[in-house]
Image: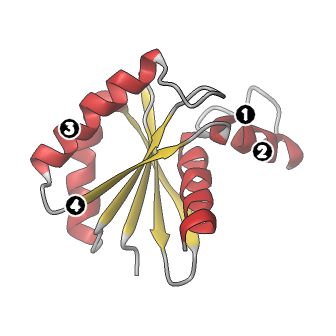
Amino acid sequence: MWTYLAIDWGTKKTGLALGNPTLKLAVPRDVVATAQVIEHLSNILKANPIQTVVLGLPLTLTLTKTATTVNIEEFSAQLQSKYPKLTIIHYNERGSSKVSIQKLRDRGLDNRKIQNYDSLAACEILQNYFRETL
C-alpha cells in the first residue's frame, strides 16, 4: 500500500514517487509540469491512501537555504492548505538529482536520453528518508 508520496519540486518540472514504509520501498511515479502539480496530486491522492508527503528541500553543504528553497516552502504551504490532513515533511534533497542521473548513465543512457529523471530523484529522496528514519 502506497502511503507516502515524495516530491522533487523544480521550477519547470516536478518528479513524484510513491512509497511503502513497511517495505521501505519507493517507486517512481510521474514527472509533471510544476504549474499543474497540485492538480495532478488530487488524482494520485484519490487513487492511493497517501498520509505523508516527503518534500525535497534543497540545502547547501552548510544546511542553509537556497533561492529555490523559498519557492518550495511556498509550494508546501499551498499543499498543506489544500490538503490539511496530509503530514508534510521537508527533507534535505542534496544530491538526489545527481545520483539519479548517474544511475541512468550507469545503465548506458546518454545525456540526450536522460530528460525526465525527476521522478527518479523523488524516488531517491524517499529511499534516503526511509533509510534514515525507519
Tell me the SS state at disc 1.
Answer: loop
Q: Amino acid at mark 3?
A: Ala
Q: Amino acid at mark 1?
A: Lys
Q: How many marks?
A: 4
The residue singled out by tag 4 in the image is 86
The residue singled out by tag 3 in the image is 77
The CA distance from mark 4 to mark 3 is 12 Å
Give the residue displayed 31% in from the left and 32% down from the top: 73
The residue singled out by tag 1 in the image is 113
The residue singled out by tag 2 in the image is 104
What scheme was used to colour the molecule?
Answer: secondary structure
Tell me the SS state at disc 3.
Answer: helix
Front one among 1 and 29: 1
The CA distance from mark 1 to mark 4 is 35 Å
Q: Are marks 1 and 2 in contact (CB under 8 Å)?
A: yes
Give the residue displayed 63% in from the left and 32% down from the top: 115
